[in-house]
Image (spheres, rainbow, N blue to C red):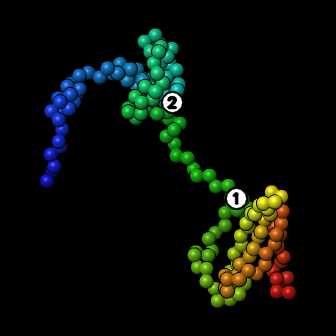
Amino acid sequence: MLKALHLSLTTYHYWKRQFLTDDPNQKLKDTIRSLAAKYPYYGVRRIWAMLRKTSDYSRINHKKVQRLMHNMNIQGAGYRRKRVKYNSYPGPDGQTTHNRFRRRFQTDRPLQKLSSDITEFKVPTTGEKLYLESILDLYNKEIVTYALSIRNQVWLLPLNQWNS
């Protein structure tokens, strides 16, 4: 069941009159459509600049052109293409690695699955940055080794030196 819309009588007659009148911007809309068809890569600023060169629209506001183009769903062709999400990680040898864990973080053997993390700290007294790299064994959730460095490239001991 539809609810009745409660409008005042003056509002109803105002909008009824508005729908019967001609659009005062129709000539401008037609000009914008023709420019957009002729120059499909032009956006709001370039179409506005082209309109300003004509004598009819030498004092037109760019916001009005933008609003009309938005209402008519006109935009430059360069804005329609999908952008690929940027991923800065190249992976080893320029390729990303495969997901071998597949969210299975439990293991029944020590040193089978290891997880590493690098954390950046800032020393409050000197303002110097320190980097802490730790390696976690997912078998019993204990830190196998860690290293502290002043550079982001932290080099840890090889695997055969961990147990010694």
Of all residues, the one furthest to the top in this rendering is 55
- Relative height, residue 56 to residue 74 (above, below): above
Secondary element type, mark 1:
loop
The structure residue drawn at horizontal position 51% and vertical position 42%, both measured from the top left corner, is 81
Amino acid type at mark 2: Gly
Q: Position of residue 23 (x, y in %)?
A: 29, 22
Label 2 crowd bin: few (<14), some (14–19), many (20+), radius 10 Å: some
The disc, 1 or 2, on the residue closer to the chain's N-terminal end is 2
From mark 1 to mark 2, how far is it between C-alphas?
35 Å
Left/right placement of residue 142 relative to residue 149 reads left
User: Front-most of 21 and 103?
Assistant: 21
- Identify the residue position indicated by label 1 in the image: 90
Q: Position of residue 92 (x, y in %)?
A: 73, 64
User: Front-most of 135 and 111?
Assistant: 135
User: Front-most of 17 and 108?
Assistant: 17
Left/right placement of residue 127 relative to residue 29 reads right
Q: Which mark is residue 58?
A: none
The structure residue drawn at horizontal position 82% and vertical position 69%, both measured from the top left corner, is 148
Q: Is residue 91 visible?
A: yes
- Quadrant of the snapshot with the C terminus: bottom right
Amino acid type at mark 1: Pro
Label 1 crowd bin: few (<14), some (14–19), many (20+), radius 10 Å: few
Left/right placement of residue 60 relative to residue 86 reads left
Q: Position of residue 136 (x, y in %)?
A: 71, 78
- Identify the residue position indicated by label 2 in the image: 43
The structure residue drawn at horizontal position 84% and vertical position 62%, both measured from the top left corner, is 150
Based on the displayed image, in which of its 4 quarters is residue 19 positioned? top left
Secondary element type, mark 2:
loop
- Relative height, residue 32 to residue 163 (above, below): above
The structure residue drawn at horizontal position 43% and vertical position 25%, both measured from the top left corner, is 64
